[in-house]
Image (spheres, rainbow, N blue to C red):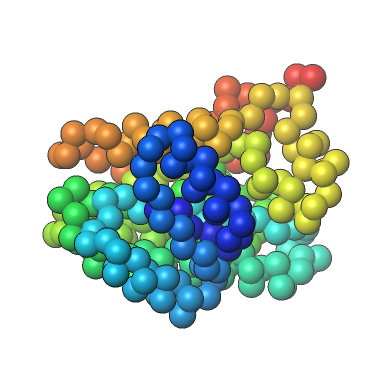
C-alpha cells in the first residue's frame, strides 16, 4: 500500500512494483496534512483490507534554513502540520487496521535533527524532537496491544529532501551533499526491512543511522 499527494507518481511506482514483484499494489492519493482526507483514505482502505501489518510514517519535510528571527512562519506551519500532525492523523486512523494484525509494527521516521538541534534548524528540529516523544508515548500506550513501535532516525540522505528544503534550488541542494558520501533512500529502506523482519518478541525501539562521514546532526566531515 503506497500513499502520497502525487497521484501520477504513485501510478508509476505501482506499475514498477507490480511488474517487478508480481504483487498487487494499492495506491491512496491524499495530503497527510489534511485530517479529513487522511481519515477518508483509510476508511476507503478498510473496504479492501482487514488489517495492515506495518505502518511506515515516512511523510515529512524541512522548509527553509533560516535563523529563528528570519524564518518564514508559513514554512513553520507546513513543517508542523506535516511532520507532527500528519503523523498523528495517519497513525490514529490506521490503528484499527493495525490491531487486526497478528504482528503489527509502526515505524516512525525521525532524524538526527530530533537528537541534537543545529543552527538554523529551529522548527524542523522541534518537529523531529516531537516525533521522538510521540514514538516513546506510542510504544508505552500501545504495548498492551502488542504493537511494536520503532524510531528510525536517519542523518543526511541524498533524496529530494534538500531540494524541497531549498524550494527547488538545485545548486543549494547539491551543495548539501558535496564533499562526502551521504546515505541513500535504499540504506534506510534496508534498515526498516531489518527492523520489521526480526523475531516477534524482538523490537528495536530507537535506531540512529548516518553515513560514515557524519557524527551527529551538525558535524559532517567534508574531505573533498
- Horizontal side of 120 relative to 14 (left or right) equals right
Q: Residue 141 at x, y = what percent?
A: 23, 63
Residue 19 image position (x, y, % from top left): 46, 37
Residue 208 versus residue 85 in the image, above or below: above
- Indicate the quadrant where residue 94 lies: bottom left
Given residues 31 and 25, the one toward you in this image is 25
What residue do we see at 25% from left, 40% from top?
203
Q: Is residue 174 above or below residue 160?
A: above
Residue 135 falls in image quadrant: bottom left
Residue at 65% across, 36% down: 158
Residue plotted at (70% across, 24% down): 180
- Residue 206 seen in the figure: no
Horizontal side of residue 14 vs 72, given as left or right: left
Position of residue 204 measured from the top left corner of the image (x, y, whole percent)? 30, 39
Q: Is residue 219 left or right of residue 195?
A: right
Rendered view: 108 above or below 5? above
Is 48 drawn above or below residue 55 in the view shown?
below
Whether residue 168 is visible here, answered yes or no, is yes
Q: Quadrant of the C terminus?
A: top right
Residue closest to the eye, 218 or 154: 154
Q: x%, y% of residue 75?
A: 70, 67
Q: Residue furthest top?
A: 223
Apparent side of residue 7 relative to residue 95 in the rendered image (left or right): right
Amino acid at each position: 500500500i503506497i500513499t502520497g499527494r502525487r497521484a501520477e507518481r504513485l501510478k508509476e511506482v505501482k506499475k514498477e512494483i507490480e511488474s517487478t514483484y508480481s504483487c498487487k499494489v494499492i495506491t491512496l492519493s491524499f495530503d497527510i496534512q489534511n485530517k479529513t482526507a487522511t481519515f477518508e483514505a483509510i476508511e476507503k482502505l478498510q473496504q479492501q483490507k482487514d488489517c495492515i501489518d506495518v505502518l511506515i510514517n515516512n511523510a515529512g519535510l524541512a522548509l527553509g534554513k533560516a535563523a529563528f528571527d528570519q524564518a518564514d512562519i508559513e514554512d513553520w506551519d507546513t513543517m508542523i502540520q506535516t511532520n507532527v500532525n500528519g503523523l498523528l492523523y495517519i497513525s490514529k486512523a490506521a490503528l484499527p487496521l493495525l490491531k487486526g494484525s497478528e504482528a503489527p509494527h509502526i515505524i516512525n521516521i525521525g532524524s538526527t535533527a530530533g537528537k541534537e538541534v543545529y543552527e538554523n534548524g529551529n522548527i524542523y528540529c522541534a518537529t523531529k524532537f516531537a516525533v521522538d516523544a510521540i514514538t516513546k508515548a506510542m510504544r508505552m500506550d500501545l504495548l498492551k496491544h502488542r504493537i511494536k513501535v520503532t524510531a528510525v532516525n536517519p542523518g543526511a540522505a541524498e533524496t529530494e529532501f534538500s531540494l524541497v528544503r531549498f524550494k527547488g534550488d538545485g545548486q543549494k541542494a547539491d551543495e548539501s551533499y558535496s564533499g562526502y558520501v551521504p546515505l541513500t533512500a535504499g540504506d534506510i529502506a534496508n534498515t526498516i526491512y531489518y527492523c520489521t523482519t526480526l523475531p516477534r518478541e524482538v523490537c528495536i525501539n530507537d535506531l540512529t543511522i548516518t553515513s560514515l562521514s557524519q557524527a551527529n546532526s551538525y558535524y559532517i566531515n567534508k574531505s573533498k
